[in-house]
Amino acid sequence: MDSKDIYSQHKFTKRQRDILSAALRIIATEGTKSLTLKKVSNYVGITDAAIYKHFKNKRHLIICLYDYVKAMIISTISPIVTQKSSAKDRISILIDTAIEYLVAHKGVNLILLAESIYHNDEELREAMLSIFQGVGTLIKTLLLAGIATKEFKEELDPDMTAICLIGMIQATLTRYMLEKEANKKSFDLDKMKESIKKNFFYGVTKK
């Protein structure tokens, strides 16, 4: 499914996508506390009143932002699932693609995760969980494919294994963002990607 299909599914108009994209950039560079509808409208180049034609209020914008992020992530990695290659090769590409996407968007998933937990907001937690489940489902699909072709161990629990891989990606991203903010240049992202693959496949590949 391409990005247009996913955006259509979530019923975002072109203007709504422009607004959500602007909100995402503000959050990534300035944090959620700096996000205001006035700042977003200025960023997009519309009047303060015009933004209310697309979003009821700031909370509505933030809730939609989770769906927007999910749509972007899924549309980025879902084409990998249908590629004509081994399950191992596709998971390897997924790892690279997911990390590169998240780094390019300045770890916005970490920001949204912190936001959903910090404010003890059930609706935001459900929205964040939906992002994890969406990514987890794609990984699980590849794991099941690998089990079927006997690339991966038959005794694998696809759900838990998918969670483990998401955790490895998330932890790598967290370390990268922290070291980047601390101006440390020792973190080799490409080396870490290869390390994730090596350790993950060591655990799942049939000997």
Image (tube, helix red, strand yellow):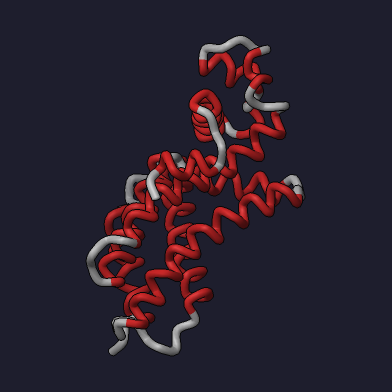
- Residue 146 image position (x, y, % from top left): 34, 77
Quarter of the picture holding the C terminus: bottom left
Choose top left, top right, bottom left or bottom right for residue 200: bottom left
Q: Nearer the viewer, residue 184 or 10?
A: 10
Choose top left, top right, bottom left or bottom right for residue 147: bottom left
The image shows residue 175, relative to residue 140, as above or below, that is above
Name the residue at the top extreme. 47
Name the residue at the left extreme. 85
- Residue 16 image position (x, y, % from top left): 55, 27
Q: Is residue 34 found left or right of 182 in the rendered image?
A: right
The image shows residue 112, relative to residue 13, as above or below, that is below
Q: Residue at x 45, y 54 (%)?
A: 175
Q: Is residue 192 visible?
A: no
Q: Residue at x 43, y 57 (%)?
A: 172
- Residue 195 image position (x, y, % from top left): 32, 66
Q: Is residue 202 visible?
A: yes
Q: Residue at x 49, y 39 (%)?
A: 7
- Residue 106 image position (x, y, % from top left): 45, 40
The image shows residue 61, relative to residue 77, as above or below, that is above
Q: Residue at x 33, y 66 (%)?
A: 91
Q: How many marks?
A: 0
Q: Is residue 34 found left or right of 205 in the rendered image?
A: right
